[in-house]
Amino acid sequence: DQQVKQNSPSLSVQEGRISILNCDYTNSMFDYFLWYKKYPAEGPTFLISISSIKDKNEDGRFTVFLNKSAKHLSLHIVPSQPGDSAVYFCAASFNTDKLIFGTGTRLQVFP
Amino acid sequence: DTGVSQNPRHKITKRGQNVTFRCDPISEHNRLYWYRQTLGQGPEFLTYFQNEAQLEKSRLLSDRFSAERPKGSFSTLEIQRTEQGDSAMYLCASSVSTPVGNTIYFGEGSWLTVV
């Protein structure tokens, strides 16, 4: 039972443009959502999070949007840079419990 | 470096051998997690501790796997009688439990290859 889904395994974006990564979840009890970035052979690095009481959170080039009615969140990266090329995981939790992760989206930013 | 530390970073072992991974969490983080990641998948939850108490174990954690966190500091994950299917990256993470949300911080992982 995949409670957190990232349906796009890969995304390719030109440098300077916007990258939009999507994530869907099935458990309406989730109340905290996070995005992580992962380079090969390294552990995931925390990027940004959002509580279910908000619908948007921004940190520099990264913005996370939450649509609770659609059980959907997205990560926007503007402008995209070559160093952003990595695998991005969304994760969700309920009541400060463990995180449940999606399967990841590989982002490639080309010049 | 005050991040989560894991060792060894890489381990190659023969099938049937036992292996142990160690994790040192961020200082003063009271929660410690173990996850496993295989190619093309996201991190899968294995178990977590709050201080020295093991609060939850995934059904993925067979009886060949055991984790400990003595004195609520570092943790070890032992895999007995390793199988080829155990080959994966084992990730440790830690956090401070808060009433709002639980951001966990990962170490760099320990790669296990069972041959």
Image: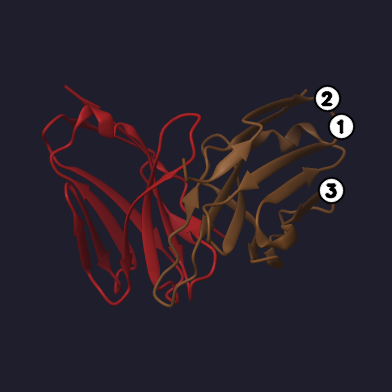
Chain colours: A red, B brown
| Residue A72 horizontal side relative to residue B79, left or right | left
Element at label 1: loop
Is tag 2's residue or tag 3's residue first in the polypeptide sequence? 2
Q: Chain of mark 3?
A: B
Q: Residue at x 73, y 47 (%)?
A: B77
Locate the C terminus of chain B by quadrant. Answer: top right
Q: Are marks 2 and 1 in contact (CB under 8 Å)?
A: yes
Quadrant in the rendering for residue A72: bottom left
Q: Chain of mark 2?
A: B
User: Closer to the N terminus: mark 3 or mark 1?
Assistant: 1
Q: Nearer the viewer, residue A8 or A52?
A: A52
In the image, residue A36 lies at what x, y percent? Answer: 39, 48
- Density class for disc 1 (Cα within 10 Å; few <14, some 14-19, many ≥20) is few
Residues at badges 3 and 1 in contact (C-beta under 8 Å)?
no
Badge 3 amino acid = Arg
- Label total for image: 3
- The tag on residue B14 is 2
Element at label 3 = loop
What numbered label is drawn on residue B17?
A: 1
Q: Residue at x 11, y 33 (%)?
A: A16
Looking at the rendered structure, the secondary structure element under dot 2 is loop
Q: Is residue A103 above or below residue A80?
A: below
Number of the label disc, if any, that sits on residue A41: none
| Residue A56 position within the rendered picture, expressed as x and y whole percent measured from the top left | 20, 65
> What kind of residue is marked 2?
Lys
Rendered residue at 43%/60% (across/down): B103
Residue position marked by numbered label 3 in the rendering = B64
- Counting from the top left corner in percent of width and height, residue B31 is at 57, 63
- Specify the quadrant of the image occupied by residue B14: top right
Say yes or no: labels 3 and 1 on the same chain. Answer: yes
Tags 2 and 1 both on a single chain: yes
